Image (cartoon, rainbow, N blue to C red):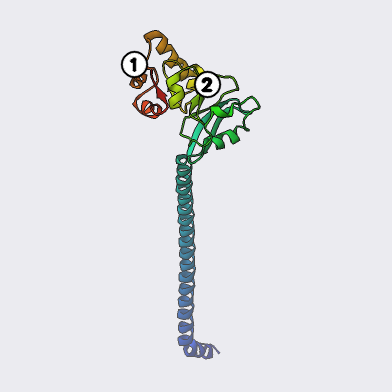
């Protein structure tokens, strides 16, 4: 009986060894496949994370660039006087005075249409001042003046030596404070001898002077 069992073991020994080796190889292959799948999943997660981070960064850069372009293409102006909604408004750099008046709700019934040039192109930090009927202002539409300065009436320019606070505020870039400063300088130092004397007024530098030169004159 025992001899028969031993004999059968000898007969199937090779088959058992081969089967055992097969199991070991199969187990090794299964482990390798699982490890490979884990590596693939890890790589996919890393790629997804990098792609998401890259997309976010590009979106942020594009947003900042768009915001920068948007700001560069805008001007901020102060609309005041005889308008329905005085205030500071932001418009496209290609806008005209008319567009600023529309933003401010339009002119009131008291507005003097001759006091403002609605076709004038806006510049950043400009003041758009609409005078009321009866105010002593320059008629920028017809190049005549309602002031008593003869030279101003002929040239359509604001006379530094005779203009009132309201006159000065009809010029883009001059608000109430700057108009008061110009008048204060004139009262303290006498008449302006030339337009270049404006550079002596507090707050008026070389760049501002160049912008104002085309709108002002002296006796």
In the rendered image of this protein, does residue 12 appear above or below residue 152? below
- Which residue is nearer to you in this view: 15 or 99? 99
Q: Which residue is mark 2?
A: 146
- Mark 2–mark 1 contact, CB under 8 Å? no
- Which residue is nearer to you in this view: 106 or 8? 106
> Residue 184: where, in percent of width, then height?
43, 12
Residue at 49 percent of width and 83 percent of height? 16
Q: Which residue is mark 1?
A: 193
Residue at 41 percent of width and 15 percent of height? 161
Q: In front: mark 2 or mark 1?
A: 2
Q: Is residue 106 left or right of residue 177?
A: right
Q: Is residue 79 left or right of residue 22?
A: right
Residue at 41 percent of width and 18 percent of height? 160
Q: Is residue 205 left or right of residue 3?
A: left
> Residue 183: where, in percent of width, then height?
44, 14
Q: First in sequence: mark 2 or mark 1?
A: 2
Looking at the figure, which quarter contains the N terminus?
A: bottom right
SS class of the residue under badge 2?
loop
SS class of the residue under badge 1?
loop
> Residue 25: where, in percent of width, then height?
45, 77
Q: How many marks?
A: 2
- Which residue is nearer to you in this view: 58 or 89? 89
In the rendered image of this protein, does residue 57 appear above or below residue 116? below
> Residue 48: where, in percent of width, then height?
49, 58
Residue neighbourhood size for the residue with mark 1, other residues' Cα within 10 Å, grouped as few (<14), some (14–19), many (≥20): few
Using the image, tell me which numbered label, if any, was put on residue 111: none
Looking at the figure, which quarter contains the C terminus?
A: top left
Q: Residue furthest right?
A: 109
Gap between marks 2 and 1 measured at Cα = 23 Å
């Amino acid at each position: 009986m025992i001899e028969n069992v031993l004999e059968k073991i000898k007969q199937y020994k090779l088959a058992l060894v081969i089967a055992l080796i097969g199991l070991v190889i199969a187990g090794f292959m299964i482990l390798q496949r699982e490890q490979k799948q884990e590596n693939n999943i890890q790589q996919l997660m890393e790629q997804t994370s990098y792609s998401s981070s890259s997309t976010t960064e590009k979106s942020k850069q594009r947003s900042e660039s768009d915001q920068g372009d948007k700001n560069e293409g805008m001007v901020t102006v102060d609309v005041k006087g005889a308008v329905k909604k005085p205030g500071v408004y932001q418009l496209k750099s290609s806008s005209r005075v008319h567009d600023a008046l529309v933003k401010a709700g339009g002119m009131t019934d008291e507005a003097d249409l001759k006091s403002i040039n609605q076709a004038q192109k806006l510049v950043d930090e400009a003041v758009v001042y609409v005078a009321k009927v009866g105010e002593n202002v320059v008629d920028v539409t017809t190049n005549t003046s309602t002031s008593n300065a003869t030279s101003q009436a002929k040239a359509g320019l604001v006379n530094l030596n005779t203009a009132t606070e309201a006159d000065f505020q009809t010029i883009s870039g001059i608000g109430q404070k700057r108009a008061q400063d110009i008048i204060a300088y004139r009262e303290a130092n006498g008449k302006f001898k030339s337009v270049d004397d404006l550079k002596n007024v507090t707050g008026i530098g070389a760049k501002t002077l160049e912008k104002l030169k085309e709108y002002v004159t002296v006796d």
